[in-house]
Amino acid sequence: MQVDFNGVITGFDRLPLGGFFQFSSDGSFGLCVADGGGARAALTLPTADSKNNTIWIQIGGMTQPLIHFPDAAMRPKLSSRIPRVIGSGLICAGAQRFIRAFETQSQHKIFDVESGLIAAVDDHQAVQFSEWSVGRTVDGKFEELYRFPPNSTK
């Protein structure tokens, strides 16, 4: 029998930077990044139970198996564009895509979605999308794995 599962079970230290993954313990999702000092970190994405829609930076403590989705793709909801950059969300500037995540309520970093590295974005040259999803294409259709914010509708 074949199993139609395109995820890869792996440890956090084996995730590629920019890799989209799911925590095996609670089913929440994240993105593998590198902080300014080169240490690996996770951008933990909010769940439906989260108090707010903040994306947080988590360093360390990720010893559980993870499900990596190597062919995951992010899609912004075009009607959710915001002309200025605020809070967490998908930021597009030129041909690059970024996510803003927070270390504390007032300190944030911006990460390149593809490389997982810290990046600088000129807010005056960027558009933010307040709604987006991550999924994969199956039989020509987009199969959603995660939606931001998690309580939004299609």
Image (tube, helix red, strand yellow):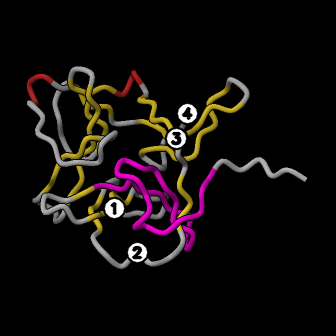
Q: Are marks 1 and 2 in contact (CB under 8 Å)?
A: yes
Q: Amino acid at mark 4?
A: Lys
Q: Which residue is mark 2?
A: 62
In the picture, residue 97 is in which quadrant? top left
**Relative to residue 16, is residue 61 depicted above or below?**
below
Q: Left of 44 or right of it: where is 144?
A: right
Q: Against 76, is 46 above or below?
A: below
Per the image, label 3 sits on a secondary structure element best described as loop
Q: Amino acid at mark 3?
A: Ala
Q: Earlier in the sequence, mark 1 or mark 2?
A: 1
Q: Which residue is mark 3?
A: 72
Answer whether labels 3 and 2 touch (C-beta < 8 Å). Answer: no
What is the CA distance from the residue labelled 3 to the residue labelled 2?
21 Å
Q: Nearer the viewer, residue 100 or 12?
A: 12
| Magenta span | 7-33
Mark closest to the chain's N terminus, 3 or 2: 2
Which one is earlier in the sequence, the residue at label 4 or at label 2? Answer: 2
Q: N-terminal of the two: label 3 or label 1?
A: 1
- Pointer 2 local density, CA inside 10 Å: few below 14, some 14–19, many at least 20: some
Residue 95: x and y, percent?
A: 27, 22
Label 4 to label 1, Cα distance in Å? 26 Å
* Residue 150: x %, y % from top left: 47, 49
The residue carrying mark 1 is: 42
Q: Secondary structure at mark 1?
A: strand
First in sequence: mark 4 vs mark 1: 1
What residue is shown with label 4? 154
